[in-house]
Amino acid sequence: MTEWIYIPLKKASDIDVSKPLLNAFKSIYSGTSGQKDYSDIVESFSKLRKNALWKAFEKSESALEILYRYYDQVCVLEKKIPSHELQIPFKWKNAFGGKQSLTVLGLGYEKVCVLFNIAALQSMIAVSQPLDNDEGLKLSAKLLQLAAGILNSFKGSVMSIIDSEPTPDLRPETLEALASLMLAQANEIFTFKAIHDNMKDTIIAKLAAQTEEFYFNTLKLMQKEIFRAFWDKDWIHLITAKQLGYKGLAEFTQSKVCKKNNKIGEEIARLKVAIELFNSALHESSKLRFFEDNRDKASRRLTEVQKDNDFIYHERIPDAKELSPIDKVAIAKPSPVPEKFSSDFLDIFQELLPSTVYQAINNFESAKRDLVNSEVAKLRNARQLLNGTLASLNLPAAIEDVSGTEIPQSVKEKAVAIRNAGGIEFLEKMMNELPDLLQRNDDILNEAERMLNDEQSSDDHLRTQFKERWTRLPSTRLTQQFRLNSQKYRGIINNAKNADKVIKEKYNEHREPISLLCMAPDTLAHHIPTGAAVTESGAVNELRSLMESVATLKAEQDAIENELQSKSVDSQSIFTQALVNGELENESSLVVGTLDKYYSSLKEQVARSLQKQENLIKFIQIKHGEFSREQQNSGSTREMMLCKLAGAYDVFIELKGNLQEGIKFYNDLTQLLIIFQSKISDYCFARKTEKEELLKDLTHNLSVDNQVPDETAGMQRMTLSRPTTGGQQLPYPTANQGGMPVPHGSFPPLPSTYNPYNFTTYVGDALPFLGRFENVHFLKVNIANPIRMLWKFLLFIQFILFPKHNET
């Protein structure tokens, strides 16, 4: 009945999406979803991609449904992975042929290309429908309007999504022209439907007039200067033919309206215009039998009505310019892009959180961590102050020294605790681990930074070499987040180095008294000087009571710290529900409110404990003053040693905790840095793939470039020809006998793998007339050695001129 145009499909490269996805999930969700193995669902996604992209070429509705499902999955995945977390080099070729392709990192580009293919496949299925029944007409019109809506939906955003020069099929101008074409064909379907249903001529004329306008707009878009030699020439002829043909159909159908209204003169004028337009359309494309049939009908009617007018009506026939324009009605409109294309979509990654929820949880966990660390730091600083005060006052050892020669009970308990904890050897073992752990993290970060620097250096070098032809995005724009994270990790490592230094200094300062506490009780007793025994008094009893209060206070503070650190908050449920309720927009207030709900009582307990400790220290200092005035042993060497031992115990406990935290910190940091390095490795691999593709295109263009260096550049022109053997071109050039290339002068840039002097020629190929000498063994000559070539050539000439002499 008519000819149709469908949009060709883009072709995607088969790439590995599994490894980058697994790295991204490991980086993002390890803290929120546990150590779940995502291998199976990632493999399912990879299979879905392959199935969707290659099934599309079957051009069936089932293939379209698979493509729908894959697009929906990409959209869902895009909401669950921040754009900077995923580095996959998606490569797609230009749909309109040629070797043009584009590789871009990110799901946004993949989504645009899949959306383009959905529109293309919809157009293919639409134009393959039978137009002689309602089902075919309805499906065709529906798909064409959907395709128009899809192409219109991203024509304004495609440049920002790709953020580089797109392939010609994805340029906004191309998308606009294709959307206009789909809309014109959809309105054409409605015109067929009106004809098929025998609707009124007035309606058919309006539909045909609107279809003509749609094709006129499409033709105007496709004939822009930017599309010179871009479209298939048959497309332009066919669209021109349809624009003329539907204008003719509108006039022909309107002439029928004139006939019913007895406007014979206008009918004749419109029939003449219609026949002329039909003829012009058929001149553009002879395949449109529909217009040919209507032209024949119009011609027969014109002959008939002219005869009647000549003999009966004698009406004036108006000029074509005097005819009133035909009203238009546009039924075809671009359909909005549905939120979900697939009717039975099942999210492969349904267990993963949306990125907005993930970000909110991250912000909450960060705020929670800061709050807990702040409150714990208050408790620990208070504990250090309390221990330091007691150690400086030699409490409780001073009130336990009832003999003046034996080790006080509190010192014995502290010595036993240190020995049970592993003693000074345990501290030294952990301290010896720190440098190796630090170096391991430093090496991982250095390697990650090296990969980034090497990739950027390569990109900068090639950008300098190829200048404006190096069209991909600069590395500096793509690696901003990587660089920022690298600086943060570097700062963390530097802070850790400072912490290691502080720990080492504190250890060296208290090493001797800690070593004493590690000794056996008898040996320890020999290192403690003797002194006067404590005298029982009211101050001693009150100090003993205060020491019990100190023990109680420490237990309370330990319990508060433990509760602060172990407090569990189901942040995932809280923020997921907030997303459902639409409350996630006010994320900061939600975070503050949640923290206040779960931690306000603990913060109050910390404040009360600190105030209680402050009052307790005041009473202890007062009573110790009374105690010192009563006792004779105050300020003795024994008291000083006991004070030092008490302080050494506190330092041991502090160092042990710090070292354990340090080792855990370094091990946790290693895991983070490994993930960070893996993501950078994925990025560098993706950029390497993109670089190789671009270099391949550029070097291909250079290899077919026939530009010859100017004679003024100090070198002789060399004409290259391609000799033929059996009608086929050989893959290597041969040098004309008129000259040799000179290894200097101005050459166009060449790829590093190509040496312009490293090719060979055969004299037999260069001199085909010598082929009659069957016994001649042609010499392979390397033109990089002109003297040797000349010598062998002279020997060859001698062989030809003096064959008998050569035989001897």
Image (spheres, rainbow, N blue to C red):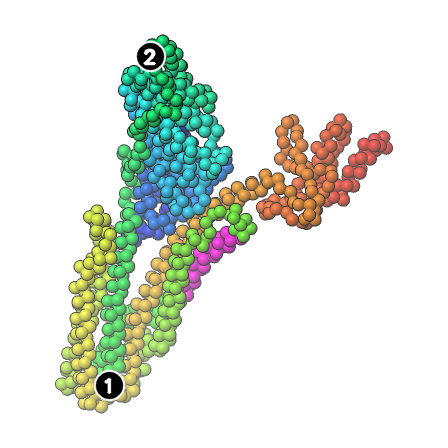
What residue would you read off at disc 2?
A: 313
Residue in the foreground of this view, choosing between 121 and 287? 287
Q: Residue at x 42, y 35 (%)?
A: 221
* Other residues around mark 1 within 10 Å, as few (<14) / some (14–19) / many (≥20): some
Tell me where the magenta segment starts and ends, as one range: 435-462
Residue 130 inside the magenta-drawn segment: no
Instruction: Confirm whether the magenta stretch covers residue 444.
Output: yes
Sequence-wise, the earlier of marks 2 and 1 is 2
Which of these two is toward me, 251 or 150? Answer: 251
Which quarter of the picture shows residue 786? top right
Residue 507 as seen in the image, left or right of residue 567: right
Left or right of 136? Residue 561 is left
The amino acid type of the residue labelled 2 equals Tyr
Image quadrant occupied by the N terminus: top left
Q: Quadrant of the C terminus?
A: top right
Q: Which residue does the image show at 48% across and 56% down from the upper left?
A: 453
Q: Nearer the viewer, residue 94 or 459?
A: 94
In the picture, the disc for residue 404 is: 1
Q: Residue furthest top?
A: 311
Q: Residue 48, percent across and down?
A: 36, 36
Residue 65 percent coordinates (x, y)? 32, 32
